[in-house]
Amino acid sequence: MRLRPGDQAPYVVLEDLSGQETLLEDQWRSAQHTLLVFLRHLG
Amino acid sequence: MAQLRQHTSDFEALKTNVVIISFGSPYNAQLWEKETQSQFTLLLDPERNAYRAYGLERSMLRSWGLNTFLTYSRLMLNGRKWRGIQGDSGQLGGDFIVNANGIIRLAYYSRDPSDRPPVSHLLDILQPTASHIYLDGLSS
């Protein structure tokens, strides 16, 4: 389901390049705003 | 990405953290970082749980249109290397702006791989006086 402005951003777990799990919320809590860019792929 | 990089100082001035998310492998992610010289945080989502949670769609039809071939041709002419298809080539991307409380201020769903919101729109939304703006790649 698509998200809209005003919605709560989903809480998800991602990985850094060393394979360590990281919470996405830690990113947005560390700044006034966070721009999340979901790539199609790295080709 | 190149356009985002050109505005790194603008994002910093607007106290905005830029996070790139991919479902590529760590090896390819490191190659991509080196090739693009990206200074932004790059996180991986190999199972695409975040893609699903954010409502990002997949469509082979929309992923492999003329715009996609033109975009990849332009990138390769500018020196990018083609490393083949990685993962699900039908997965579409998108851009979201989230505030420090986790409230979404922008949700932009790419209609195809070449469709990204203009950086000027992103910067407008990040201005302290901006109200909520909704941009949708399918409706523009």
Image (spheres, coloured by chain):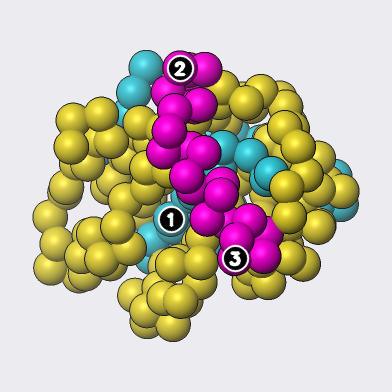
Chain colours: A cyan, B yellow
Q: Chain of mark 3?
A: B
Q: Label 1 to label 3, Cα distance in Å? A: 25 Å
**Residue B130 visible in the snapshot:** yes
Mark 1 on the same chain as mark 3: no
Q: Which residue appears at 52% of the width and 55% of the height?
A: B74
Q: Residue B78's mark? A: 3
How would you rate the neighbour count of disc 3 (Cα within 10 Å): few for under 14, some for 14-19, many for 20 or more? few
The type of residue carrying mark 1 is Leu
Q: Is residue B27 above or below residue B64?
A: below
Residue B103 on image: x %, y %: 33, 44
In the image, the segment drawn in magenta is: B53-80
Front disc: 1 or 2: 2
The type of residue carrying mark 2 is Leu
Image quadrant containing the N terminus of chain A = top left
**Residue bearing the label numbered 2:** B61
Front disc: 1 or 3: 3
Badge 3 marks a residue whose secondary structure is: loop
Badge 1 marks a residue whose secondary structure is: strand
Image quadrant containing the C terminus of chain A = top right
Q: Label 1 to label 2, Cα distance in Å? A: 27 Å
Q: Is residue B121 above or below residue A15?
A: below
Q: Residue A35's mark? A: 1
Residue A31 on image: x %, y %: 46, 65
Q: Earlier in the sequence, mark 2 or mark 3?
A: 2
The type of residue carrying mark 3 is Asn
Q: Are marks 1 and 2 in contact (CB under 8 Å)?
A: no
**Residue A23 visible in the snapshot:** no
